[in-house]
Image (tube, rainbow, N blue to C red):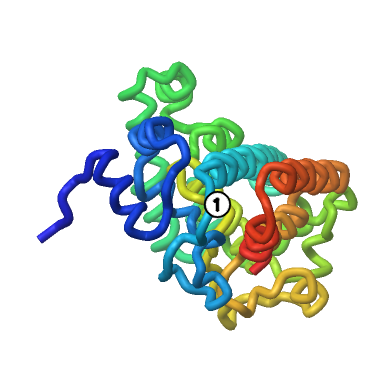
Amino acid sequence: RLKEVKDSTEMIAILNGHNFFPKNEPLFRNYLEENGYYFTTGYRRPVLDSFSAKSWSGRYETGLSENFFYEIAEFDKKLSILLLKYSNIIERRIKTRTAFFVYKQLSESFYLDCQNFSSYERWVEFINKIYLEVLRDGLKNNNPVIHHHILKYNQILPAWALFEHLSFGQFIKLITNLNVQHKVNLLKDVYVSSKTHYDVKSYMSNASAHRLLDAVCHIRNRIAHLGRIYDWKFVFLINSSLTIQSSFLSVVDLNKGYLNIVDIMEVFGLFIPKVEYIQMKSEYSILLDRLSNSIQEPYYSRIKMLICE
């Protein structure tokens, strides 16, 4: 039988049973009603007496204030905004540079030629599951761009317009399914840039670069669905198809099978200019400084440990 829904008074009673007693119970009860019990207690790991055992079990440490939950949730929200901003910069940069690439080296309607894909099956999948869906959604939502190209250009969208109407995940899948030679040329033209913090080509193969874009998309999707960020492991599996140089593995330990927040920002460094990478790290440091001024020890140190774990 599933657990029954608890009201805020019952939630407080559960917390009391775990040794947590809010100092302003009415205010915290209202907070639970606005944010939810599981969202709020999802931040509890650093304040459990079992923290040294890296366990989620255990009781809340004596004397804990509800201020911890307010501050850590605010930090997580601002961290999400920061990562969302730079993931959007990556998407815009990659889509724009890829549009120029296909215009110069392929054609504006390159996606209609099955020879540009790694297999006929991949091409059919793209046309049926992505391209036609873009056209259908455009008609359904009365999108003027889609309407214009359906009426005047026989349902053919130029690459730049197509990319604007693909989700980041759909776009990554499209470029991942291109044939090998196109992906190699794409890497040279789009990802390798003297402006980025890390030069992708110096660190990994084209296939690996495309896979790491998945990590950027993954974290953005989690943010969009209001998921906790600061104490979350983003699964990233290494397989034989990925060629990553040891020089980058010294920056991000991909062999551990997941990416933490610090790892994610280093991955961002493969796709954003040096100046923006430095700005991102500076904004992150400011968030940590603010957190250190609002959350007492040992909780602040524990939070930093979880971010880098």
* Residue 282: x %, y % from top left: 82, 44
Residue at 38% across / 55% down in the picture?
124
In which quadrant is the C terminus drawn? bottom right
Work out whether 240 lies above or below 81. below
Residue at 50% across / 72% down in the picture?
50
Q: How many marks?
A: 1
Which of the 4 quarters of the picture holds residue 179?
Answer: bottom right
**Residue with the most extreme bottom position:** 240
Which of the 4 quarters of the picture holds residue 185?
Answer: bottom right
Q: Residues within 10 Å of mark 1 (few under 14, many from 20)?
A: many
Left or right of 127 on screen, residue 140: left
Residue at 48% across / 56% down in the picture?
44
Left or right of 76 on screen, residue 59: left
Q: Is residue 186 visible?
A: no
Work out whether 241 lies above or below 115. below
Residue at 47% across / 32% down in the picture?
156
- Between 4 and 268, the one lying in front of the other is 4
* Residue 4: x %, y % from top left: 15, 50
* Residue 94: x %, y % from top left: 68, 45
Left or right of 114 on screen, residue 275: right
* Residue 121: x %, y % from top left: 39, 63
- Between 270 and 240, the one lying in front of the other is 270
Specify the amino acid type for callout 1.
Answer: Ile
Report the residue marked by disc 1.
229
**Residue with the most extreme left position:** 1
Could you tell me which secondary element the residue under label 1 belongs to? Answer: loop
Q: Is residue 288 visible?
A: yes
Left or right of 31 on screen, residue 264: right
In which quadrant is the N terminus drawn? bottom left
